[in-house]
Image: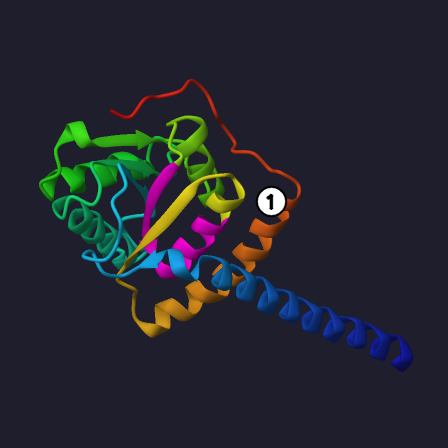
Amino acid sequence: MKKVFKKILLFFLLGIALTSVWIAITDSIVKKTVSEKLYSSVEEIPYNKVGLLLGTGKYLRDGRINAYYAYRITATKELFEANKIDFILVSGDNGTKKYDEPTTIQKDLLEAGIPTSSIFLDYAGFRTLDSVVRSKKIFGQESITIISQKFHNERAIYIANKKGIDAIGYNARDVNSYANTKIQIRESFARIKMMLDLLFDIQPKFLGEKIEIR
């Protein structure tokens, strides 16, 4: 019985070790590939016609405003007011009638002073891969500025590069270290999932008719 237990423990520890190595290698590849395409200064970032704003929920479970959400709205406003983008493609999850990221984001962008004519909504951005791929296949963008936090931009730009999209990222302000630690752990596994999706050429959940941004 002890020998069986030791073998199980050995395989378990080996699995953890291999997963850790895979995570580290994936993280290194992504960061090195996209490092020169990330910007935190609105003055330095190049112009693109369209900014792809990656959605997230506005509220946390305890009812407070999600800081990741608020900082992305601020970053989008900065880009638009600096004339670094002309249009905003809001891509998020609209999986149920009670959960509609794009419409919620649109309302806050309008309150921030961005005109309706400059905002386009993608209701089928269920995942980052979906949002990025649909920006090209549905909305016809070959070159985009992705707006999110740095860790998210890194993954989104990597996907864009693999899908033939010339993408750069504008980094929204990050969140406190405690919340960021949890997000970074989740991001590590999201990058592994991303590599598998790219390897097997996984496509967005929905495509559909093309929409011209102009």
Position in image of residue 206 (x %, y %) = 49, 27
The stretch drawn in magenta includes residue 57: no
Position in image of residue 38 (x %, y %) = 35, 58
Which residue carries the number 1 mark? 198
- What scheme was used to colour the molecule? rainbow
Instruction: Tell me which corner region of the image, top left, top right, bottom left or bottom right, holds residue 113.
Output: top left
Image position of 86 (left or right of 25) = left
The quadrant of the image that shows the N terminus is bottom right
Q: Residues within 10 Å of mark 1 (few under 14, many from 20)?
A: some
Query: Magenta residues, as a range?
Result: 143-158
Q: Which residue appears at 52% of the width and 33% of the height?
A: 204
The stretch drawn in magenta includes residue 155: yes
Mark 1 residue element: helix
Relative to 39, residue 128 above or below: above
Q: Of 124 and 152, which appears nearest the observer?
A: 152
Image position of 190 (left or right of 211) = right
Instruction: Tell me which corner region of the image, top left, top right, bottom left or bottom right, holds residue 2.
Output: bottom right
The quadrant of the image that shows the C terminus is top left
Q: Amino acid at mark 1?
A: Leu
Position in image of residue 83 (x %, y %) = 15, 43
Numbered marks: total: 1
Q: Which residue appears at 17% of the width and 37% of the height?
A: 107
Image position of 49 (left or right of 25) = left
Relative to 126, residue 23 above or below: below
